[in-house]
Image (cartoon, rainbow, N blue to C red):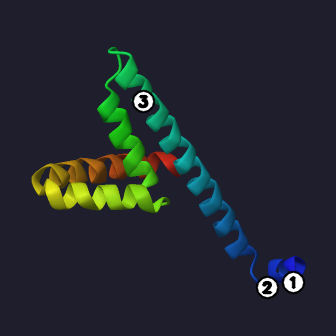
Amino acid sequence: MARRLHLIAPHSMEISKKKFIYRVSRIALGVMFLILGIAGFIFPILQGWLFVAIGAILLSRDIPLFRRLIKWIDHRFPRIWRAADRNIKKIIQYVKPLSRR
């Protein structure tokens, strides 16, 4: 079955591999930022809430708990979320050309 699928659409398999690698790396980064955030709550040197927020944003696409948390923040604090959303879009516009190299 896999051989037949590979003969039919090799390009789509490459795309799905790229998406899988992108998703796994996004989840790994999100977990790493959450761990840094928890360490930041313990050690006063790190800004814990900032790392937790970044981790939650990264994980919100894949984990429903964080998706609900982001929606709650959007509903509860709309001005803060609009400002954060603008900054996230700017960062994405900056990072996308770097990832194509």
Asked whether the beta carbons under mark 2 and mark 1 sit within 8 Å of each other, the answer is yes
Residue identifier under label 3? 38
Q: Nearer the viewer, mark 2 or mark 3?
A: 3
Res 71 visible:
yes
Q: Amino acid at mark 1?
A: Arg
- How many angstroms separate mark 2 from mark 1 (CA)? 6 Å
Q: Residue at x 89, y 78 (%)?
A: 3
Q: Which residue is mark 1?
A: 4
From the top left corner, tell me how far across and down residue 96 is, in percent: 43, 52
The N terminus is located in which quarter? bottom right
| Along the viewing direction, whichever of 57 and 83 lies nearer the viewer | 57
**Which residue was labeled with disc 2?**
8
| Label 3 close to label 1 by CB (< 8 Å) | no
- What is the secondary structure assignment of the residue under circle 3? helix
**Residue located at (86% from left, 77% from top):** 2
> As shown in the figure, which amino acid type bears the numbered disc 2?
Ile
